[in-house]
Image (tube, helix red, strand yellow):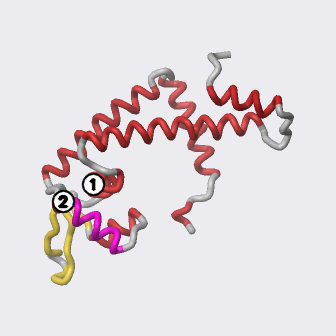
Amino acid sequence: MSAEDSVDRLLARIAAAGVETIDLDVEGIVDRINGINMRIKRAHEEVLRAHGLSHPDFSVLSRLRLGAENGRSSPGELAADLELSSGAMTTRLDRLEEAGLIRRLPDPDDRRGIVVELTEEGRAKWDSAAEVQARRESFFARTLTKPEQKQLNELLRKLLLALPDSKKK
């Protein structure tokens, strides 16, 4: 067995207390996933802070960088993708536009509408933050071999697919 972690110590306390309603294997899985998630989120927040971004800002930039046609999208599509109200979306777009990371343009297909476009500065900031984050994520996974990473991915996918999806409600 490998070295003991904090979850092992918690599981030992649960077992010693004679709590039989808690499945120790399940508790170990959930607590370890939570611990890993907490550490990855903390590292991601550090990266974003270093790039002058918040997680909500990064989410909008990500949608434009990765999913939008030519780095463009309507505010309504962005709000729907991010599950935000139009007011919350407007606040985010105002902040990003003020920072020079996006621009609002007239919609060529609807003279009443606008299109949100990722600026070169926005693209560069997103690319830089994503590159640093990718290196950090590789650092987190470095103790696993490539076959182990693939195996863990398959197992986590299986767990994730078995959970209800909040977007499908």
Q: Is residue 144 above or below residue 87?
A: above
Examine the image and state in which quarter residue 98 appears.
bottom left
The residue where tag 1 is placed is: 61
- Residue 49: name its quadrant: top left
Find residue 36 and report its horizontal and vertical position in percent: 52, 35
Whole-angstrom CA distance, mark 1 to mark 2, is 8 Å
What secondary structure is marked by label 2?
A: strand
Taking the magenta stretch, the answer to whether it contains residue 128 is no
Asked whether, in this view, residue 53 is left or right of residue 37, the answer is left
Toward which corner of the image does residue 44 lie, by quadrant? top left
The kind of residue on which mark 1 rests is Leu
Which badge, 1 or 2, is on the more N-terminal residue? 1
Residue, x 14% and y 74% (percent of image)?
A: 106
Quadrant for the C terminus, please.
bottom right
Give the secondary structure at mark 1: helix
Query: Which contiguous range is marked in magenta?
Result: 86-96
Q: Mark 1 and 2 residues: CB-CB less than 8 Å, in contact?
A: yes
Q: Is residue 122 above or below residue 33?
A: below
Which residue sits at x=19%, y=83%?
112
Give percent across and percent down for residue 94.
Answer: 22, 66
In the image, is 81 to the left or to the right of 121? right
Residue at mark 2:
102
Residue at the location (15% across, 63% down)? 103
